[in-house]
Amino acid sequence: MSLANAKLEVDQNVKSRDVKLKGFWQKAKVREAISGYLFMAPTILVLGTFLIAPIIYAIFLSFHKVEILGGLSYRFVELKNFLRTFEDERVWIALKNTIEYVVIVVPCQTILALVLALVLNKEIKGKKWFRIIFFLPTVTSSAVLTLIFIWIYNSNGLLNGLLDFFGLPTYNWLGDPSVALKSIMIMNIWSTAPFFMVIYLAALQDIPRSVYEAARLDGANEFDQFINITVPLLKPVTFFVMVMGVIGTFQLFDQSYIFSGGTGGPNNSTLTVVLLIYQYAFRSLDMGYAAALALMLAGVILVTTLIQRGFFREEKAN
């Protein structure tokens, strides 16, 4: 055998081996990918069934006029459902109430949660019991809390009794349009702040004590430490708390529904966007319009969250 033929045979053997190795590794990657997808299959199935599929169906409904009575039917109406929202007076009332609720509740519950966390982070006697007591409203059913507060807000209830005892003016908390939404705000601030308090408390305990000790050695008092150490280090947590607060408050439904009996009264003062969606979907049976409202609400929440993210990112850069 000549030297050229021997070299050619060796090259062919090397190429054949490389092809076999490449095929082996490709099969191994395919098997690995299949195994991974099999492990993820239950989660993908659940998410696809209860999250992705409903979103796709809602988008489909928003472009159709849906007839439920007399047989389910769909009629494509293009963008009419979305354009109708600009002419619907109740949409603007519900949006105004919801934005007012968000603007007041989110900052108040965030500040209250931070104050409670700062207090419980101190070495005070019985702080473990205080943590449990403060957290109780969070683990209580929202519907039960609402029924309790309806009793408290009653004209002859506990709150008016206390106000009258101290010589302060009493209110028709459930029937006066000027205070009905404020009564829901008070209840939600009281019931949701403890949940965010726990998040703040965990973040406070994660801040190294050495940072505060160094600040004290430099002559910083507690207020200076709070402004220059605690607040900056808690910005990521504050961003999370505010985003979760905005999402939760924009989705206000059960308290408004129970307080008003599903009407959004008195005089639409407790009507929120989600309650309005419910009314159109399950009372008027206008599923297409309700789906369009739901998508527009999702867009508002998304834009608000992105604005918050940009604000906190700019603060961090500065």
Image: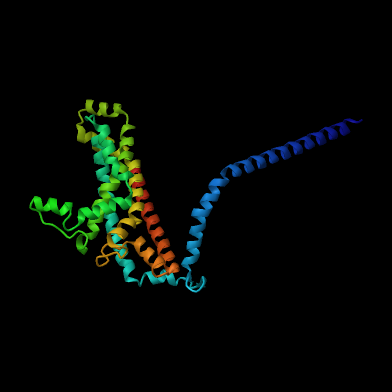
The N terminus, quarter of image: top right
Quarter where residue 173 is shown: bottom left
Residue 219 or 77: which is nearer the viewer? 77
Residue 280 or 110: which is nearer the viewer? 280
Residue 81 visible in the displayed image: yes
| Horizontal side, residue 97 vs residue 17: left or right | left
Residue drawn at point x = 27 percent, y = 65 percent = 265
| Horizontal side, residue 143 vs residue 299: left or right | left
Residue drawn at point x = 20 percent, y = 28 percent = 219
Where residue 120 sits: x, y (%)? 25, 35
| Horizontal side, residue 287 vs residue 149: left or right | right
Where residue 31 sits: x, y (%)? 66, 41
The C terminus, quarter of image: top left
Residue 218 or 60: which is nearer the viewer? 60
Where residue 161 sits: x, y (%)? 13, 52
Where residue 220 sits: x, y (%)? 21, 31
Quarter where residue 223 is shown: top left
